[in-house]
Amino acid sequence: MVLDGRIAVVTGASRGIGRAIALALAERGAAVLVNYASNDAAAEETAQLIRNNGGRVLTFKANVAEPAEAASMVKAAVAEFGAVDILVNNAGITRDNFILRMKDEDWDQVLGVNLKGAFNCARAAAKVMVKNRSGRIINISSVVALIGNASQANYCAAKAGLIGLTRAMAKELGSRNITVNAVAPGFITTEMTDGLPEEVKEMMLSQIPLKRFGGPEEVAETVAFLASDAARYITGQTIAVDGGMSCA
Ligand code: NAP
């Protein structure tokens, strides 16, 4: 149980990659705060899966784009479990459109959740981690931050911003024994990608050297590694979990 006794906050953990991350951290012994935006039933399902395995869990509804809600979430983890050792900034949304048609609100919402949300949560959690002289922050970026993607200017900018945020925080917080890394998933089968047109999926598949889409648990295993002591000398890095999509 490599994360025995650790306390993790995972944003956007009701479904998809966030749920897989919450389960992977709990399986390794961490107590987990499962954050979500609106889907009470899905968040409860994640929590039940953790409880069934004997894990400790708390669900917490909060919009990470709102600084006060992100701060309340971190406070709730400290009140329930006593600390925050691991923060995974996973909550994310897409509002795709070509740049000429992209509305201001599509830009603002995507930057608000994916980038400002991570900043809001990291700022709140880092206060606790600095006091404890220990912590792990893992930001879920995307392969499109590295290679770009048409019709996702807002999402690509937010996810590339996360890589800059990761590097800056790694430099700032390293002296307090806090590591900050990013994981850049490729095409992972979740509700976020289920809705994409078949021709987009086929085009994506043709760009993946491993010739298949990834599963949420394959991202979660990398996150669990970065959260563990085995990764204690890794900081400021972005690890692509993308079947080789970004290596071309
Ligand atoms: P998903 O299935 O759409 O799940 C999104 C999660 O984020 C849900 O738990 C949702 O909560 C939560 N969320 C959305 N807005 C939120 C907000 N304002 N505050 C708090 N939580 C919020 O997405 P996914 O595919 O698992 O993606 C997870 C992360 O990986 C995202 O950051 C995404 O950008 C990134 N990613 C995904 C892929 C992929 O291929 N799937 C590839 C690269 C990167 P509710 O259930 O309450 O709505």
Image (spheres, rainbow, N blue to C red):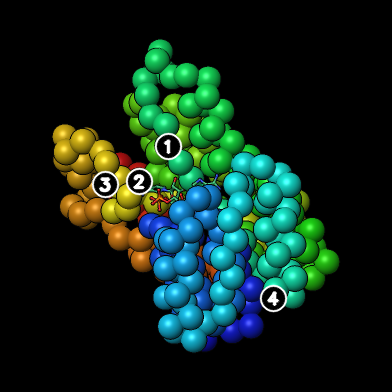
**Alpha-carbon span between mark 3 and mark 1:** 13 Å
Quarter of the rendering containing residue 59: bottom right
Residue sitting farthest toward the right: 131
**Mark positioned earlier in the residue sequence (3 or 4):** 4
Q: Residue tagged by mark 4?
A: 81
In the rendered structure, are the residues bearing label 2 and label 1 in contact, judged by CB atoms less than 8 Å apart?
yes
Camera-nearest residue between 184 and 41: 41
Instruction: List the residue tagged with mark 3.
Output: 194
Q: Which residue is mark 2?
A: 192
Which of the marked residues, 4 or 1, is nearer the chain's N terminus? 4
Q: Amino acid at mark 1?
A: Thr
* SS assignment at label 4: helix
Considering only vertical position in the picture, is 123 above or below 228?
Answer: above
Secondary structure beneath label 1: loop
Q: Is residue 146 above or below residue 38?
A: above
The amino acid on which the numbered mark 2 sits, given as a three-letter code, is Met
Asked if the residue at tag 2 contacts the one at tag 3, i.e. Cβ–Cβ closer than 8 Å, the answer is: yes
Judged from this view, the residue extending furthest toward the front is 41
Q: What type is the residue that disc 3 sits on?
A: Asp
Sequence-first tag of 4 and 2? 4
Q: Spatial distance from mark 4 to mark 2, Cα to Cα?
A: 31 Å
Q: Is mark 4 within 8 Å of ligand 1?
A: no
Whether residue 82 is visible, yes or no, is yes
- Disc 1 CB within 8 Å of nearest ligand 1 atom: yes
State the residue at coordinates (61%, 52%): 62
CB at mark 2 closer than 8 A to ligand 1? yes
Q: Is residue 46 left or right of 158 when viewed as pictured?
A: left
Residue at mark 1: 94
